[in-house]
Image (tube, coloured by chain):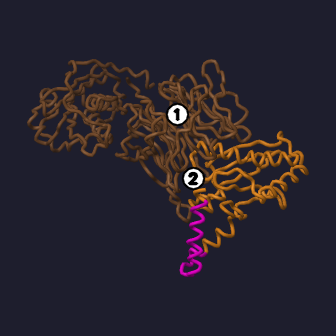
Chain colours: A brown, B orange
Amino acid sequence: MTKKILILLFILIPFNANALIEVDITRGNLNPLPLAVSPLSIDELSRKGFEKILKKENIGSEISNIVENNLRTSGLFNPLDKKAFLQAPDIANLKPRFEDWNLIKAQALITGKVNYVDDKLRVEFRLWDVLAAKEMMALAFTTVPSNWRRVGHIISDKVYERLTGEKGYFDTRIIYVSEEGPKTLRIKKLAIMDQDGANNKFLTLGNELVLTPRFNPTSQMVTYLSYFKNMPRVYLLDIETGTQEVVGDFPGMTFAPRFSPDGKKIIMSFAKDGKSDIYTMDLENRIVEKITNHPSIDTSPSYSPDGKYITFNSDRSGYQQIYVMKNDGTDVKRISFGNGLYGTPVWSPRGDLIAFTKLHKGKFYIGVMRTDGSGERLLTENYYQEAPSWSPNGRVLIFYRETKTDSKGEGFSAKLWSIDLTGYNERQIKTPTDASDPSWSSLLSN
Amino acid sequence: MTLNKILRNTLLVLTACLVLSACATKKEVATEIKGQMQGDVYTGTDTVEYLADGVPDRVFFATNESILTTASRETLRAQAAWLRKNPNINVVLEGHADERGTREYNLALGERRANAAKDYLMTYGISSDRITVLSYGKERPVDSGSNPLAWSKNRRSVTVKAN
């Protein structure tokens, strides 16, 4: 249903060409930009209309809360307390009194309006530069009312893009593995939720073990590992229809699947006789190709965004290290040379970095390095954490972290966390159950 | 290797404790580990079940390793003899890893461990038709503890009757 959502987007007023406020996202941002998110104004008739359909008292405030929450969790913005706002939302949207907003130290202001028109939700919003006393952007959307959360995410993306110069990542979803039960017999289910944790939904029942779900580029399909009938195999799931199928006809365990950047192939490992090699399968013609051929364990493959290279994990040197090769399996080069073991390489959507998990002296790290292995940077250290997945703009990594059990075997937990590429802004992403193996979708609207 | 080192250090500390005889609880832990691990391979019998009298169902591995120890080979020879005596029984070899590794690599490592056991059974005359290999990686620990002893129990290949 996601992709079929009707979103009409039109520009009310052309963008002001000169960038006014700018937010630098390349360095750790210790001084987030103070900004005011004025509640979207709503007339009484529209308010009542939405209250009836959506069971939300004031959908204007709800949408602005989403925007505020998104911008705050990005770590780049500091949304100011609404109690300090002097100007009423409807008047602010027409013409802000910039002195008032300046007084509370807001550098940017978001205003807007919500209407109930022909059973549709119409939202307009404006972004203002308070210091320059200028409008920076104005947009309007019309969509079905049930889409109201997505409208909040799209507004957040537009504001993020206008102020940082880079695409946002708020209108996105996370697929992950929900975990429950004792550590020795975990019940695992595929689950999907909005990037901010809303709209959580389980996709499997927990009858069989499932691991490592990953989205395709359009975020409609997922490839994952399932122990259906106790045969660990790579599966393909259509999120909309719920249809599932085994990928390929391998006489043994297939695992560690990911899509190629064009979505046409699945790359994965196939284990046989103690050796794991990397294979691809073309989803259209079902042709299977063997990419690596080595007695070692070759796993966790991930394509470069242009599809020309593959990074993967191999213990051919004796221990787990990260390698890069051409997409046909030639020109294999080891790129990790630091102390410790390296695993789960994932190529950044921007192409310039590879994120990884590192194990060194009993600690686990999430880090990034350039694609030639230089410039290794460790972002976070913990007892156990792994499996980074990039936000679609390549600025944030989501991963999972497990806690130690105590001497009684208790205290175990698995949670999703995110951290900026800068190493700042580490946050837990709340999930209804324990969670692991997160995978971030692409931007749903473009 | 890393773990080995940690373990060695722990043992050093614990031995020091013993000498000073100042920490009673740690003393117990130390003897427990000493009795149940060699290097970092589990040698105890806590978790072991038996396929038949004198035929243990599992073998244990060192961190990141899939090499069979002398004790493991002895266990597998007993399994092979039992399988030869019971030609109608087929088995699944379930390979496992401890929690101190990335999920996907551990799946491969579990497969490699189970295959090490399979190869050995085959050299003792058991046909590969009778053996299925299944890796659980780190998904099914027997001991939920976060300590070297628990990890050593979890690095295993378990022979399970398939019929």
Q: Amino acid at mark 1?
A: Arg
Q: Which quadrant of the figure contains the C terminus of chain B?
A: top right
- Please give the name of the residue rendered at 31% of the width and 19% of the height, measured from the top-left corner: A9
Q: Please name the predominant secondary structure of the magenta segment in the image.
A: helix
A255 or A276, which is in the foreground? Answer: A276
Find disc 2 in the rendering and name its residue: B100
Q: Do the dots labelled 1 and 2 sit on one chain?
A: no
Task: Where is residue A219? Give x, y as percent.
Answer: 48, 28
- With A54 as the anchor, is A84 left or right in this view? left
> Magenta region: which residues?
B4-27
The residue at the point 59 percent across, 29 percent down is A331
Indicate the chain on which mark 2 is placed: B
Can residue A229 be seen by looking at this rendering? no
The crowding category of the residue bearing disc 1, from other C-alpha atoms within 10 Å (few below 14, some 14 to 19, many at least 20), is many
Q: Label 2: how many residues lie within 10 Å, few (<14), some (14-19) or many (20+)?
A: many
* Residue beneath the point at 13% across and 30% down: A132
Residue A419 is situated, as x and y percent measured from the top left of the image, at: 39, 44
For residue A214, the mark is 1
Name the quadrant of the N terminus of chain B: bottom right
Cα gap from disc 1 to disc 2, whole angstroms:
23 Å
Q: State yes or no: residue B24 in magenta.
A: yes
* Element type where label 2 sits in the image: loop
| Above/below status of A63 relative to A82 | above
